[in-house]
Amino acid sequence: MLKDEPGTEEVPNVFQIMYSSMIHWTRLIAGGLALPLVFPWLVYNLYRSHFKNKIFRNRFLEDKVVLITGASSGLGEALAHAFHKAGTRVILAARRTDALEKVKKDLMEKYPSKNVPVVLTMDLLDLKKMPEKAKEALDIYGHIDILVNNGGISYRGEIADTDLDVDLRVMFTNYFGPVALTKAILPSMLEINSGFILAISSVQGKIAIPYRSAYSSSKHALQAFFDTLKSELNHTNIHVCVVSPGYVQTNLSLNAVTGDGKQYGVMDQATASGMNPDEVAENIIIATAAKRSELVLAGLLPKIAIWIRVVCPWLYFYMMGSRARRIRASNAIKQE
Ligand SMILES: NC(=O)c1ccc[n+]([C@@H]2O[C@H](COP(=O)([O-])OP(=O)(O)OC[C@H]3O[C@@H](n4cnc5c(N)ncnc54)[C@H](OP(=O)(O)O)[C@@H]3O)[C@@H](O)[C@H]2O)c1
């Protein structure tokens, strides 16, 4: 048959048509999305690198009054170093006055400054005294610019074997204490229409894991309270940021309370190999200068777990059920 004979030219079949139109639309969509996605990404990264710049950040933080709870050890101590180094006026709060005095001495030796840290003994469990403690803190410089609700306690145990007193103690330390302190400081911030409130929660404030019921519940409550506060203060110049770290190398597990109220006293493997507290503090400082409203400081796996809990709850419960069975089988409920 001759090639130019009518009806003999190659007619593209339906699959070729579909394929070429798919390529065409993919190019169009990719081209159309590239600019709106890449441009904000570039702007966001420029913005972030701006706040990573210490000169700019320290100019923003200089002479700000920062009240840090749980400043006697761990992450609170690292935050005290980071804020003091940035030129702020820090008020160090916790129960152990001697440990706070040592932190104060270390700060002045490491970074001599006109801003001498002030020690404030405070028990987060003592809710009745909170207004008095807040007044004591406010009287030092006349106001608080940044309130860091960091003090807290962890827990190891099984719900069935845990005294209610233990649930209350964890809940009062990690939730009602920060709530009472924030409520006592907030009116002074509202008066000057300025302030920044940080709540150090945890990845466990977003997802609950087995044998950590009291801790995880207290952090979920903390997240909800400060999320609500954030929206209620939306019309003001007071900002709220919830920080959710994964494991951090501190004494948190050593100081954790067990189901019968005793001190756990063991350094968990996960905590021992966690993030460096100084790095976590550095990220919190950047978030403060950038007035961020949320900060999840964790690796990819915890972030995926948070996501699975939201989009695929049955898979999350399957994973946590297996985890609980595994821990039970190895008879290591407290160690996990
Ligand atoms: N380490 C982690 O893996 C991790 C992960 C996510 C979130 N976090 C959070 O980070 C925060 C700091 O914990 P950390 O890891 O630094 O543990 P940490 O070394 O045990 O420090 C806890 C701090 O809280 C203070 N505190 C405990 N009970 C208190 C009370 N009743 N009243 C006043 N202060 C109290 C302690 O001071 P005193 O004993 O002197 O009172 C201490 O300074 C906690 O909120 C914790 O939930 C930690």
Image: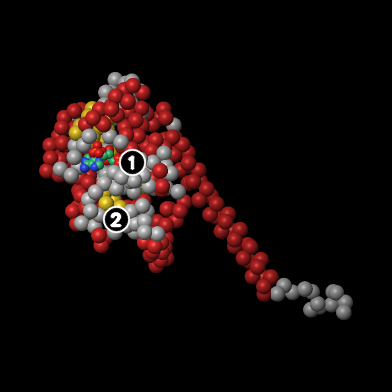
Q: Which residue is mark 1?
A: 251
List the single residue furthest toward the front.
331
Q: Which mark is residue 125?
A: none
Residue 76 placed where, x, y %?
Answer: 31, 37
- Tell me where residue 162 appears, x and y as whole percent: 24, 57
Within 8 Å of ligand 1, the CB of disc 2? no
Mark 2 → mark 1, Cα distance in angstroms: 18 Å
The secondary element bearing badge 2 is classed as loop
* Left or right for 196, reference 51: left
Residue appearing at x 27%, y 23% in the figure: 116
Q: Which residue carries the number 2 mark?
A: 157
Label 1 CB-ligand 1 distance < 8 A:
yes
Which image quadrant: the N terminus? bottom right
- Quadrant for ligand 1? top left
Q: Nearer the viewer, residue 106 or 331?
A: 331
Q: Residues within 10 Å of mark 2 (few under 14, many from 20)?
A: many
Disc 1 residue type (three-letter) = Asn
Q: Quadrant of residue 144?
A: top left
Could you tell me which residue is drawn at 85 percent across and 74 percent down? 3
Mark 1, other Cα within 10 Å: few <14 / some 14–19 / many ≥20: some
* 305 over 241 or under it: above or below: below
In this figure, what is the number of numbered marks?
2
The correct choice, above or below, for 33 with respect to 311 in the image is: above
Check the image and tell me how it is coloured: secondary structure
State which tag comes first along the sequence, 2 or 1: 2
Q: Are marks 2 and 1 in contact (CB under 8 Å)?
A: no
Residue 44 shows in the view: yes
| Residue name at image x 53 percent, y 54 percent | 33
Look at the numbered disc 1 and give the secondary structure of its residue: loop
Of residues 228 and 266, the one drawn nearer to the viewer in this rendering: 266
